[in-house]
């Protein structure tokens, strides 16, 4: 079977959708030479009318895509840095996201925002290391964070086909992930459907994005003593609450590992919803970035602000020890 | 005239920046500097010429390609190198790195990793200094790519409207990553200034003396209440957009183009203006200074992970940890 890298999967998803639907177009900076690789070869295949290298004008081209979407296109925007979402937050959260409701359903805004390399990139410092997926889930923009190459393919295809704006975070910690896949079997992954990477009976670990791989490693380490279920929501908004409830019916214990800042991160919502509505025999726990973290440059400091395997392992052990 | 503004002083600054970048690129290759850098090799005349027209109490804001600006404004190269290496002895105690180097004692309010973001910051600082009754000025660096940012054009308007003592320095190095000005810019850089009634000039950004002369006029105007001036310094980026390119090699310019672009070299242009013996002395002194800077950087301690969120708040507010 061919090995598919996460980045190749993103690239393939965009190419396939452009092939399938002439309304799909791509906008972004340096996408012609494909600095992130996600857009590699697209300019050659589809030409300048559908692959638009933009000036460094994020606010303008984000709403430009909104307008194009309202007039029948299905644009995908690539942002080079997650922090550019702060720059274009108005255009996404306050414009694109609100038009369906505010027009009484007269329009739809099928735009995809792709973030290749979200989260820490190994010492790129404060303005290049954010992971603001919780912010988008909070304002209600559809938000996905694929952990694997197949899910990157499937979720990006779904995002492009979706009639609403969707933000696709591709964590830098997952970009190097490769998988043996049957290319013919690549398929769309519906929003709001979680994936259980590993079944277990003692604790459910909900892991977001690249942290799925850390959760799997911790589950391996603990195998024999604790049976860990690794639950990857894949899509944060909408969220697979039914899937989580079913998992907690089996385990009754919950640990969330989430690369968000602690206060108001998606981990908080997951823990709160489980506490309100689901079966828990022990207090739920979170492993996150600190409150309001700004990632410092030096490697040691950058790492000190991100969730670690040892923190996750300790949280799982505490969860099993309690109740 | 200050020493930095003498022909030999301009050469010294250009040589300092050139040598600093060579060493920094090596340290990136060796894995000592993480995250890579955006080298300013080839663009040294802009930093040297502009800063030579400033006083120590004037301030600058810089960009992701800011090593030259920071050094030319007077930051200690050793502490700058230590910052790039992520040591506690660095200018920002290892918290900022290449793209956020700041030295308030030298008037460097900081490099900024978001294109165009520091231009309004420079304008605001300039305004506040005037409000305080001082005749200090601020100078903002930004690239050719940055003039496509709304916030930059909005800042031109504010600065002109309120006659803010700011000098706007556009470093047109021919590229915004892979994109050329002709592909991204309708109109011209100086045309944008003209639209706001801001005096503007195109300057030979390969010639430190030409940059100094143009900046001297702009600084005088700002100091005497005449408001902003825009200088478009036309230069050429000799090296990669980011050191990442040294391994990935995206193709957006040909070898012939690079050869043509690097034919005029600020180091040679300024070097030819001073006696050979002076040049040799400066070269030797600069090499010694920079070798010592690298030694200092490598000898510096790595910061303690327990201090990761020190300085998150000016008030000392401590955030909750991410795991209990
Ligand atoms: C607002 C914003 N958009 C995109 C980026 C990614 N990026 C970093 S540098 C760069 C090109 C900048 O070009 P220019 O302003 O000409 O400066 P140069 O790199 O040539 O010094 C881009 C697109 C960014 N840092 N900030
Ligand atoms: Mg440029």
Image (cartoon, rainbow, N blue to C red):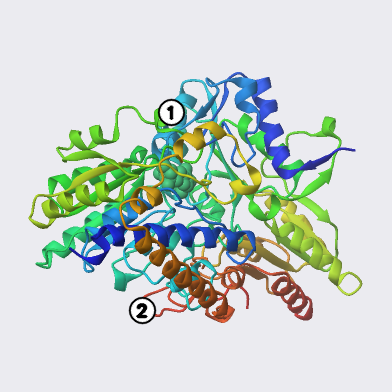
Where is residue B73? Give x, y as percent: 31, 64
For residue A9, side relative to residue B263 (left or right): right
Q: Is mark 1 within 8 Å of ligand 1?
A: no
Q: What residue is shown with label 2?
A: B315
Q: Quadrant of the N terminus of chain B?
A: bottom left
Mark 2 C-beta closer than 8 Å to ligand 1: no
Mark 2 on the same chain as mark 1: yes
Q: Above or below — where is A268 with respect to A244?
A: below
Kindly report which numbered mark, 2 or 1, lies closer to the viewer in this rendering: 1
For disc 2, the neighbor class at 10 Å (few under 14, some 14 to 19, many from 20) is few
Q: SS class of the residue under badge 1?
A: helix
- The answer to which quarter of the image holds residue A66 is top left
Q: CA distance from mark 2 to mark 1?
A: 46 Å
Q: Position of residue B22 (x, y in %)?
A: 52, 58
* Chain name for mark 1: B
Q: Chain of mark 2?
A: B
**Residue picked out by circle 1:** B183
């Amino acid at each position: 079977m061919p090995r598919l890298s996460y980045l190749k999967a993103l690239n393939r998803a965009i190419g396939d959708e452009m092939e399938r639907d002439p309304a799909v177009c791509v906008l972004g900076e340096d996408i012609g030479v494909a600095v992130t690789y996600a857009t590699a070869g697209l300019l050659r295949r589809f030409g300048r009318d559908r692959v638009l290298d933009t000036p460094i004008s994020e606010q303008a081209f984000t709403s430009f895509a909104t307008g194009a979407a309202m007039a029948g296109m299905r644009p995908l925007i690539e942002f080079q840095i997650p922090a550019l979402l702060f720059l274009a937050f108005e255009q996404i959260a306050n414009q694109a996201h609100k038009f369906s409701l505010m027009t009484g359903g007269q329009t739809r805004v099928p735009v995809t925002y792709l973030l290749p390399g979200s989260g820490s990139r190994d010492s790129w410092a404060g303005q290049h290391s954010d992971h603001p997926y919780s912010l988008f889930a909070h304002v209600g923009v559809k938000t996905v964070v694929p952990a694997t190459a197949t899910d990157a393919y499937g979720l990006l295809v779904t995002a492009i086909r979706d009639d609403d704006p969707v933000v696709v975070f591709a964590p830098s910690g997952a970009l190097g992930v490769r998988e043996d896949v049957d290319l013919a079997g690549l398929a769309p992954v519906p929003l709001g459907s979680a994936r259980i990477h590993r079944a277990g009976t003692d604790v459910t670990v909900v892991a977001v994005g690249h942290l799925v791989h850390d959760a799997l490693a911790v589950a391996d380490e603990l195998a024999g003593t604790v049976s860990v279920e690794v639950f990857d929501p894949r899509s944060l908004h909408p969220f697979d609450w039914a899937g989580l409830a079913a998992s907690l019916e089996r385990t009754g214990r919950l640990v969330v590992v989430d690369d968000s800042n602690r206060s108001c991160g998606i981990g908080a919502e997951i823990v709160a919803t489980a506490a309100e509505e689901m079966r828990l025999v022990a207090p739920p726990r979170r492993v996150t970035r600190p409150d309001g973290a700004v990632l410092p440059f030096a490697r040691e400091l950058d790492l000190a602000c991100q969730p670690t395997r040892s923190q996750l392992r300790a949280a799982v052990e505490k969860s099993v020890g309690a109740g | 005239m200050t020493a930095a503004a003498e022909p030999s002083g301009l050469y010294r600054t250009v040589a300092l920046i050139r040598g600093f970048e060579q060493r920094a690129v090596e340290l990136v290759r060796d894995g000592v500097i993480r995250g890579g850098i955006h080298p300013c090799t080839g663009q040294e005349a802009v930093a040297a010429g502009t800063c030579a027209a400033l006083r120590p109490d004037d301030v600058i804001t810089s960009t992701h390609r800011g090593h030259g600006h920071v050094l030319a404004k007077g930051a200690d190269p050793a502490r700058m190198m230590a910052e790039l290496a992520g040591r506690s002895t660095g200018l920002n105690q290892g918290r900022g790195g290449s793209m956020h180097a700041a030295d308030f004692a030298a008037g460097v309010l900081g490099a900024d990793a978001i294109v165009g973001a520091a231009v309004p910051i420079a304008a605001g600082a300039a305004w506040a200094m005037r409000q305080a009754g001082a005749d200090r000025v601020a100078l903002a660096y930004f690239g050719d790519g940055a003039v496509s940012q709304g916030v930059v054009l909005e800042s031109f308007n504010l600065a002109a409207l309120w006659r803010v003592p700011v000098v706007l320095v556009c470093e047109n190095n021919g590229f915004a990553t892979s994109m050329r000005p002709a592909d991204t810019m309708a109109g011209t850089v100086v045309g944008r200034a003209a639209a706001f009634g801001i005096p503007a000039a195109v300057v030979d950004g390969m010639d430190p003396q030409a940059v100094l002369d143009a900046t001297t006029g702009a600084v005088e105007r700002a100091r005497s209440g005449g408001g902003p001036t825009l200088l478009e310094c036309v230069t050429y980026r000799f090296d990669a957009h980011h050191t990442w390119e040294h391994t990935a090699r995206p193709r957006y310019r040909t070898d012939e183009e690079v050869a043509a672009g690097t034919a005029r070299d600020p180091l040679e242009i300024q070097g030819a203006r001073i006696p050979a013996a002076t040049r040799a002395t400066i070269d030797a002194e600069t090499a010694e200074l920079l070798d010592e800077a690298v030694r200092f950087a490598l000898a510096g301690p790595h910061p303690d992970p327990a201090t990761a969120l020190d300085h998150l708040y000016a008030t000392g507010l401590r955030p909750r940890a991410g795991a209990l």
